[in-house]
Image (cartoon, helix red, strand yellow):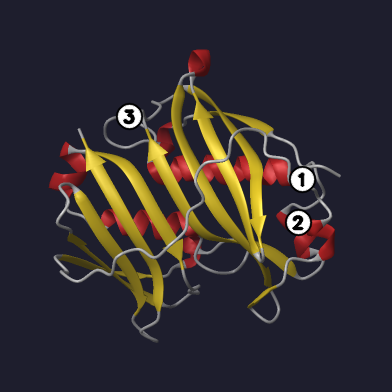
Amino acid sequence: MKSMTGQSAFTVRSTETDQNGQATLPALVGYMQEAAWDNTATMGISMYELLERDLTWVLQRMRVEMFRYPRHREKIVVETWASGRERVFLHRDFRVYGADRELLGQATSVWLVMDVVKRQLVSVPDFITAVEVVPGQEPLPFAKGKLPQLEEVRYEQRMPVRWHDIDLNRHVTNTRYLQWVLETLPPEILEKQQLKEIDIIFNAESALGDKVIATAGPTHELDVFLHKLTSSETGKELVQARTKFGS
């Protein structure tokens, strides 16, 4: 079987918008993941098919670039396709369109396969590699390389992991991690500027009852910040991210 491009339509709901009536980035990433689920289901490799084998998809990295945020009740289409495979890393791209095929944003992502019983990453199984990767469009540059380390911590918050933070994989959902990364910045930054880009790496999982320390600080680049989420219990780095804001 060959992979194929998927298209999923969404309407921005009021509960998914910010104080300006625009869709939040966590909401948009949520749409992208729903589109990915729809697309993998057509090939028999959705999360449900993996869970039947005690396996699951895990998002390892995502780089998102937004040109315009859709508003409440705006209809959008998310296109997604498998864009490449490197050893255990499976790449998937997204493009978000508004009316008249206006390109609102785009993203590239890296996925791994995890054994849900052993909580360990595994080699990509044969039933997934049997799906031939045929990129639907020109692949975006793969998200690779290390992010700079956060050295100057200027902002810090502590986030307890609660019931509604947990997803089907029984760990903190990646959109909640994304939300915590952004909420570490003060309102004066979030209110006055628009998030243009984010590159986020998911390094480890956290579970119900954990406490997460969220830190952030500026870089030498204007309107660019580095972020880190850390487990207060183990000291393990959970998430690393770089954000870029603009007018």
What is the CA distance from the residue labelled 3 to the residue labelled 1? 32 Å
> Within 10 Å of the Cα at label 1, are there few (<14), some (14-19), or many (20+) other Cα atoms?
some
For the N terminus, which image quadrant?
top right
For the C terminus, which image quadrant?
top left
Residue that label 2 marks: 48
Circle 1 or circle 2, nearest the eye: 1
Q: Is residue 123 left or right of residue 157?
A: right
What is the CA distance from the residue labelled 1 to the residue labelled 2? 8 Å
**Badge 3 or badge 1: first in the primary sequence:** 3
Q: Secondary structure at mark 2?
A: helix
Specify the label residue 41 is tagged with: 1
Residue at image location 81% in from the left, 50% down from the top: 131
Q: Position of residue 49 (x, y in %)?
A: 80, 57
Q: Amino acid at mark 2?
A: Tyr
Q: Amino acid at mark 1?
A: Ala
Residue at image location 47% in from the left, 71% down from the top: 203
> Within 10 Å of the Cα at label 2, are there few (<14), some (14-19), or many (20+) other Cα atoms?
some
Residue that label 3 marks: 21
**Badge 1 or badge 2: first in the primary sequence:** 1
Q: Nearer the viewer, residue 97 or 133?
A: 133
